[in-house]
Structures are given as structure tokens and as C-alpha cells.
Image (spheres, rainbow, N blue to C red):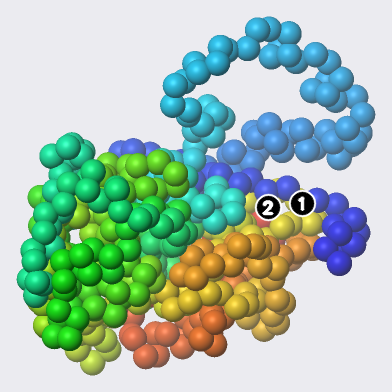
Amino acid sequence: MSSRNKSAAPAGRLQRAPEGFVSGELIDDIVRHGLDDTRRGFLKRSFLAAGAALAAGSPVAAMAGQAAKSGAKGDPMILEPRPWSTVLGKPVAFHPYGVPSKYEANLQRRQSPGLTPTPQASVAFAPLQGFFGIITPNGLHFERHHQGWVDVDPEQHRFMINGMVKEAKVYTMDDLMRLPAVSKVHFIECGANTGMEWGNAAVPTVQYTHGMLSCCEFTGVPLKVLLDDCGADLKNGKFILAEGNDGSSLTRTISMGAALDDAMVAWGMNGEMLRPENGYPLRLVVPGVQGVSWVKWLRRIKVGDKPWNTMGETSTYVDLMPDGMLRQYTSIQECKSVITSPSGGQMLLSKGFFNVSGLAWSGRGKIKQVDVSFDGGRNWKTARLETPVLDKCLTRFNIDWVWDGSPSILQSRAIDSTGFVQPRYGQLTKVRGTRSTYHNNAIQSWNVAATGEVSNVHVD
Ligand SMILES: Nc1nc2c(c(=O)[nH]1)N[C@H]1C(S)=C(S)[C@@H](COP(=O)(O)O)O[C@H]1N2
Ligand SMILES: [Mo]
């Protein structure tokens, strides 16, 4: 079915990575002064201008134009020996720890425009537009710190369990890494992901709309094993408090249900030790629950019988409702999806076939189905889910699309194993208002103009 579509329509060309063209000064300015209307407009214009400039001068565009005229025939790039095929290559282990090709230098974590006040209490968004499959490479995992990151000496790191336990215990990293380990792939999403999109279409690319999202294989010991080891009082102990060892003194209350279910005290991330930015040498993994509970540089878990109501649970990570009330402890990341290619800031350089690709996830289970609309939600087609489809994990979807050059609005809608259907933007704001900041899981719309420019729009 897909191949018939493909052969019927020539492949369209996509300018896939114009996201790197906001100047460092502009980002600094936004970080310092916030994102007002002038800066928002400027941000939008500079993304568009960069996309257009790149499209005009792009070697991809030039090559594609040539191919359209003469096919692959006569192309010196294939007919003539290339410089790199006639020299000695670089020696083995030239980089003892490998690095990406210099041609991929544009694929970077990027700072938040205007979300947070200082370089320490900040966010670096993951470039979702450049990812394939479901695994986030360790160097591109998003970062969210409340007080900067620290590089902790694992020899000096200690982890303690206390509170309502028979015996409080302190573990070294060696103690922990001797225990029976498990490895599981899960997504982590900050509760504030897509937070700038309450109200209006604020930021230009999927990196900024959805980039506080990553997915890795984590290795560690189930928290249940450690709670058992300390003789946690499971009858009266209804909650745990997790505490980090950085300057933010981040503490989070987590339900005993989540703690005993699939929470993990983890040191491994995609086959190697955690990166310092992500909590090296130890972090809590709480599948399905918002990122703030995944405490990094984890040093203590306390068992108790009621929530602690710490600052981060009462004044931040609370959802402002239209009536002025705040919802607390909305910890689960609900079913959500987004098309990552094509997405905002990219450019369709020609009509024809496109593989529309994106990510879907749910904090309540597996992804059951993803539908895609090319006309702003009037008609829907079911996308292909790529395997594996795992619990509380990103799922990659793909669907064929032949762009006829007319304006289109691309949307994706995920359904999870509980039957929950990702809401339209208007459905969500009807209940939650437009100042909720956290937990925005609305359907994302990308507008494709006749010029091929792809931009962020809100469709009710
Ligand atoms: N100790 C500590 N843990 C922390 C944080 C922090 O600032 N300090 N930030 C939290 C928040 S708000 C999120 S979204 C995730 C981000 O994890 P990452 O930086 O590995 O992406 O870590 C959480 N754990
Ligand atoms: Mo977060």
C-alpha cells in the first residue's frame, strides 16, 4: 500500500533542520528579558528568514534541481572519484569516545526562549525534529535543572533510605550496582513541556513546543527491592519523599503505588552511566510520571504517611484552572503525540511524497493507535506504529503523504491502551483555561503554506 503511493508520486524534498538560526544574542536577550510580543515576532521572522535563505542556497535544493532535469545521469558526485575515496582515512580510535559527524553540527540541544530566568534554573530542549526511532541519544537528552548541574564523584556518593522503615540504610554506588538490575525503556517528559503553548502558538519549532521530552533505556535496581531491604512499612507508609543532592534541594512526594510498581533507582542510560546533566551517578526513574519526580543526583528516599507539600509541589508544578484554583499532584503525563517531521520551521521544497513521522506516548500505558489529519482535523487516517510499542515509552509512527502543493494543516491524535483519546486544543482549554502552564497534551497543528513553509498554528 505504502509502496504504491510511493511509486505513484515522486519524492518531495524537505529542508529538515533550519532550527539553528536564532542567534546566541537573541536567545540571551530572551532569557534575560522574557518573551514579549516584539521578541516573539522577531523569533518567528528569523526562523522563517533562515529557512528561506537556506532553501534558496541549499546544496540539497541545487542537487535536487539538477536531478529533476537529468535524473542521476551526469552527476559528478556519483560518476567521479570523490576526494575522500582516494586518501587514507583517519586512524582507528581517533576519537576514543565517538562524536557525531561535523555535518550534523546543527542538531543541538537549545536553550529555552524566555521560560526561565537564569542559566542555572533553565531548560535545554531536545531536537526532536532530528531524531529517528524512539531512543534519545545521550548527548541530546533534554536538560532541566533548578540550580544547575553537578558532576558528582561516584566514590563520594551515598544514597539513604529512612523514615518509616525497620532499618534506615546508607548505600554506596558499589552496594547498589551489586544488586539485581533491570533495564527498561521509558520516556521522561517535564510537566511543563508544551507549556509555552497555553494561550497561543508561541514558539516556532517542535524542539521548543515538545522538546522537554526524551526516551532512554534505563538500568538500575527496582525501588521495591531497596524498600524491602530496609523493611519499609507498607501498611502505613503511603508516600515516599525523594531528595536530590544538588543545590536546588529538590524534593518530591511520590505515591507508594508508583514507588512499588515500576520506579527504579538508576545509574545506566542507553548502555552507559548517566550523564552528569541527567543525574550521574544516580537518579530516580518514575515511569509515566512527570519529569520533576525523576530526582537527579538522588541521595535520599524517606518513607512517610502523608504528602510533604514541599515548595516544588505547592507553588510550582501546579496547574492553574480557569476559576483560579490550582490542581496539585497531577503527576501522570497523559496520552500525547506530535508530528516531528515535517514540523515548524522546516520547509517543503517540492510537491510529492513525504514520510510524515512523529512520536506518541502515554504515562498510563501503551500507545494503541495514532491517527493523522492533513486537513486540520476534518479527516483522519491511521498511521503505522513502528515496533517496539512499549509501556510508558515513546512510540514512533509513520504515514505516507503526497503533498499536492496546497495549504494543509497536519495533526496527530494518539489513543492509549486505556482508550484515552488525545484532546483537541479547544477541548483542553475549555476545561483547563489558557494559563495552566503545566500538562498541556493537546493535539499539535503544523500549518503547511503553499510556499512549503511549515509553522506552528493553533486549531481548536
Ligand atoms: N536534583 C534534581 N533533580 C531534578 C531536577 C533538578 O533540578 N534537581 N529537575 C527535575 C525536572 S523539573 C525535570 S523535568 C527532570 C529533567 O531531567 P533531565 O535534566 O535528565 O532531562 O529532572 C528532575 N530532577
Ligand atoms: Mo520539569
Q: Where is residue 417, by image quadrant?
A: bottom right
> Between 440 and 196, which is closer to the camera in this rendering?
440
SS label for mark 2: strand
- Mark 1 closeness class: few <14, some 14–19, many ≥20 residues within 10 Å: some
Asked if the residue at tag 2 contacts the one at tag 1, i.e. Cβ–Cβ closer than 8 Å, the answer is yes
In which quadrant of the rendered view does residue 168 lie?
Answer: bottom left
Residue 368: x and y in percent read 60, 78
**Number of numbered labels in the structure image:** 2
Circle 2 crowding by C-alpha within 10 Å: few under 14, some 14–19, many from 20: many
Residue ID at (13%, 63%) = 161
Q: Is residue 245 left or right of residue 285?
A: left
Q: Nearer the viewer, residue 8 or 310?
A: 310
Residue 177 % position (x, y): 29, 47
Residue marked by disc 1: 12
The residue that appears at 22% across and 69% down in the rendered structure is 228
The answer as to whether callout 2 falls within 8 Å of ligand 1 is no
Drawn side of residue 319 relative to residue 185, left or right: left
Disc 2 target residue: 348
Above or below: residue 226 compared with residue 79: below
Instruction: Give whichever of discs 1 and 2 has the lower sequence position.
Output: 1
Mark 1–mark 2 Cα distance, whole angstroms, equals 7 Å
Give above or below for 283 relative to 239.
above
Residue in the picture at 70% in, 82% down: 379
